Every structure is written in C-alpha cells, then in structure tokens.
Image: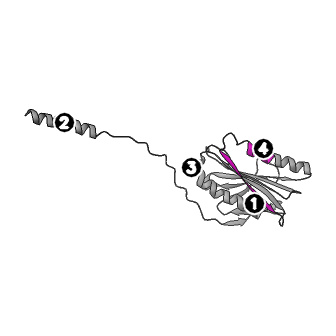
Amino acid sequence: MLQMKNVFVLAVLLLLVSCQQHYSPKPRGYFRIDLPEKSYTAFSYDFPFIFDVPDYGYFLPDTRAVAQPYWANISFPAFRANIHLTYRPINSRTQLESYLSDAHTFVVRHIPKASGIEEELMKDFERRVFGQMYYIKGHDVASSVQFFVTDSVNHFLRGSLYFNVTPNNDSLAPVIHFLKEDVRRIMHTIRWE
C-alpha cells in the first residue's frame, strides 16, 4: 500500500512538472498588402513638364495657399501615400546651386533616423535630364525616397515620398520598394515643355 502511495505521488509530481506551459512570444505580424500591376499614363496638365503617372495614383495640382505654380502631388489612396512635387524655374546658375543645396539639405535632415542612404545618379544627355534619387533606409525615417531632376538651365523638379501614417518602414517596405520604382519611372520619362 505504501509503495502504491509512493508511485501515485511520484506520478502526480511528474505530471505537474511535465505539464508546465512555456510562453514564447509570437513575432508581430503585419497586414498583407496587395500591390497592383504596374501601368502608366502620361498626365495631361498644362505644366512645364510631363511624365508617366501610375494608373493607381492620381496627379493633383497643389492648391494650398503656400503652394507655388506647378507644385503638385501624386496621391496613392490605397497606400495612404503621396509623392510631393515642387517645381522651380531656373533663372541663374546661382539659383540652380541653391535648389541643389536645398535638395541635399532635405535628405541630410533624415540622417539622425537613417541607417543608410543609397544614391542613384541619372544622366540623360539626349533628353537633357539629370538627377539623383535617394533611398533613405531606417525604421522611423519620415520620407524614404526623395529625388530631383533638372535640365541644368530652365527647370528643376524635386519630389519626396511620404506616408500618411506613423513611420514604420519595416511594415511599409513592400510599398516603399513598389513606389520607388514609380519614382524611377518619373525620372526616366520626364520631358520638359
């Protein structure tokens, strides 16, 4: 009887020890993002430039009181994102240098949050389009893609991609890479009017 009692106590102890649950946290998940197929149309506004706009985006002139002529946005409602475009006419070499300096300053402001900045240079002598795209890496970077294009004589266009959400570029990475290709398309299809 004593032996049976010892076996029972031992079995209960083994059962209690072996049934402990170990909690392991699950990795944070993100919603699936369905990306549309790439397709483009040249926009038809009376601007000093034209380029291909993605069919899943909307080209909208900037109507804010502070907006200057030919400022615009390309809105992507499905992604809650905008590419803000600022156009400036060039009247002198000094003015071009100032615009280039401003474009560089806007990128440099992201350095405290950035883990790296990739630069992509563009030169198209035939179409007289020169520019640079910046891909700013980092978890909390506000604008992960910025660019400018110019003909070095009359036209200067700067753009930056912003999301209307709190920056979390880990979860936004697929959309950022998707829209980065659209920025590249803008740069490679722009024509000065």
Q: Amino acid at mark 3?
A: Ser
Check disc 1 and report the residue beneath it.
187
Label 3 close to label 1 by CB (< 8 Å): no
Q: Is residue 101 visible?
A: yes
Say what amino acid the circle numbered 2 marks.
Answer: Leu
Report the residue at 15% width, 37% height from top: 8
The kind of secondary structure element at disc 3 is helix
Residue at 86 percent of width and 46 percent of height: 98
Q: Quadrant of residue 127?
A: bottom right
The residue identified by callout 4 is 105
Q: For residue 10, which numbered disc appears in the image?
A: 2
Residue highlighted by disc 3: 171
Q: Is residue 111 magenta?
A: yes
- The amino acid at mark 1 is Met
Residue at image location 73% in from the left, 41% down from the top = 109
Q: CA distance from mark 1 to mark 2?
A: 75 Å
At horizontal 75% and vertical 63% (from top left) the residue drawn is 188
Q: Is residue 44 above or below residue 24?
A: below
Start-end of magenta stretch: 102-125
Q: Residue furthest left?
A: 1
Q: Is residue 166 left or right of residue 49?
A: left
- C-alpha distance separating marks 4 and 3: 27 Å
Instruction: Give the position of the N terminus as an image quadrant.
Output: top left
CB contact under 8 Å: marks 2 and 4: no
